[in-house]
Image (tube, rainbow, N blue to C red):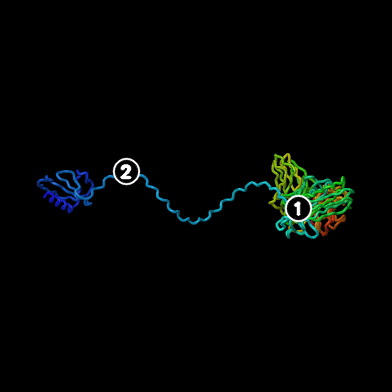
Amino acid sequence: MRILLLLIGLLVTAQQGYAQVPPQNEFFVNRLVTKVVDYIIISAPPLAPFGACRTYADTTGALYISCSGSAYALVSGTGPTGATGATGPTGPAGATGPTGSAGATGPTGSAGATGATGATGATGPTGSVGSASLPLVLTGSSLSCPTCNNQANNPYVVSSTVATTGGIIGGGFGGIVSGANIPFTANSSTSAAAGVPGAGWLRNLYVSYAAAQSTGGGTYFTLRQQQNVMAPVLTVRSAVAAGVYSIPFLLRTFAGTYVDLFATATPLATTGTTPTGWAAEYVMDDAGIMMGGYLAASISGVTRYVNIYGAGGFQTTNDAGDTPMPISGTIKNFCITTSTGQGAGGTLVATVYVNNSSTSVTTTVGAGAAAGMYCDLTNTAAVTANQGVSIQFVDGSAGGATVRNFTLQLTPSSGTPGIIGGGFLGAVAAGSTTYFKPFTTTSNATEINVQVPMPRAGTTTKLCSMTSTASAATHTDTLMKNGVATSLAVTSTASTTGISCATGSVSWAAGDTMTLRVVQAAGTGSTLGGWSVDY
């Protein structure tokens, strides 16, 4: 019965309104509950009476009861969530699962921007010149190379790129004793040679004699590259008459190598006749003209100038060092060769001058640098017909290197494919007639002693000469052919300085000889620079 009454009271509770839980009951603080009426519950044995009881229900449906002032107790429903307990210890890690298969490769991204160009590295040393086969030999009207196994791939095989005509190199002789006769000078040496500014072909050697070869004497001549690759030998034997002697050939040459004409007296000769001059055709691969000069001298801490074709030594002024150009073209591939090292106190700088102004064509021998060949194979300079060309040397050391020689290339833009000229002629005596040898500064009062033979046919249309110091009288410079004056003559009047040119037309055959005749009128002499003709 008591239990029944209690249940009825609980059911009635759910129908009552909301009221605050009494403040003495901490369990119900701040919760809304349903307040019900008090019931007097009469117990029946064997249960003890509950006494007066009070019930509450909250909004969640939980039902609480308190009897006789006791604390409220949960009768049904869910009570409020208690405080979270402390976190338990972390359990051991589980075993690693198997690695999954690799996913597909994604597409390649676009290329990034090109980075900045790094600084240029230091220039490496010049490589050694490669070995060379024997040269081609001209036999009749055809060329053959007996030592070439594969002519199609051999650099010595003549092809259509070999021009029909080329420039001319040549010089004089220092004597008949065995030695190298250097292009662009009358000097000879056992070791000197001229540096080659560009690759090409040497062709056809011509040598002239002013007198008969001595009895019992004789001389062998051969053009050489690197002093070991030789062209066929021209032999001028005992007692042969004065005149011009030649041999046809082709000898391949390469930029950065050296060339010379080697002359050897025959074993039976104790004395012999010295030739007057020699010349050969040099056909450069790019149709250029090889020019140069011989010095075998040094300067220390000063500035000096040198003629093209000048073996006249260093000059103190540019005018004295000028060689006029009879044609227009582009100068490039400038090289100097030193035979001793440069002093540690400064550099030696060589610069090509055109029309009394410096150009970008220059090469430097560094302080303390060893002897060798130093070249500018990059820069170029334009030259116009009738302008002068010279080489300036500036030495910053107290012990400058000895400059053996220099060479450069002129690629013509107009005119004939060759140039022939001479270097610093120097002072010419008043009232004198003097003959000058091409490619040199050598002079003589007798023309046959300075003649140089031409190695191919050609045509000359202009003669130019340079007067560096005027006189009170005129001088006339005339081109000579086989001992006879041609129509090309330049007359410089009194007090005239600078470059003067004359035009005309003179035809040449292979073997014809050339000189320059200078006639100085009475009064005071002139000082002459260089001269040149086209060819």
Number of dots carrying numbers: 2
Residue 104, position as x, y percentages in the image: 46, 56
Along the polypeptide, which appears first: circle 2 or circle 1? 2
Question: Foreground residue, 321 or 337?
Answer: 337
Quarter of the image where one finds residue 302: top right
The residue beneath circle 1 is 134
| In-front residue for pair 141/150 | 150
**Three-letter amino acid code of the residue under disc 2:** Gly
Q: Amino acid at mark 1?
A: Leu
> Which x, y percent locates residue 282?
77, 54
Residue occupied by mark 2: 88
- Give the residue displayed 20% in from the left and 44% down from the top: 25
Q: Residue 313 at x, y = what percent?
A: 79, 45
Foreground mark, 2 or 1, reads: 1
Residue 462 appears in the rendering: yes
Task: Say which element carries label 2.
Answer: loop
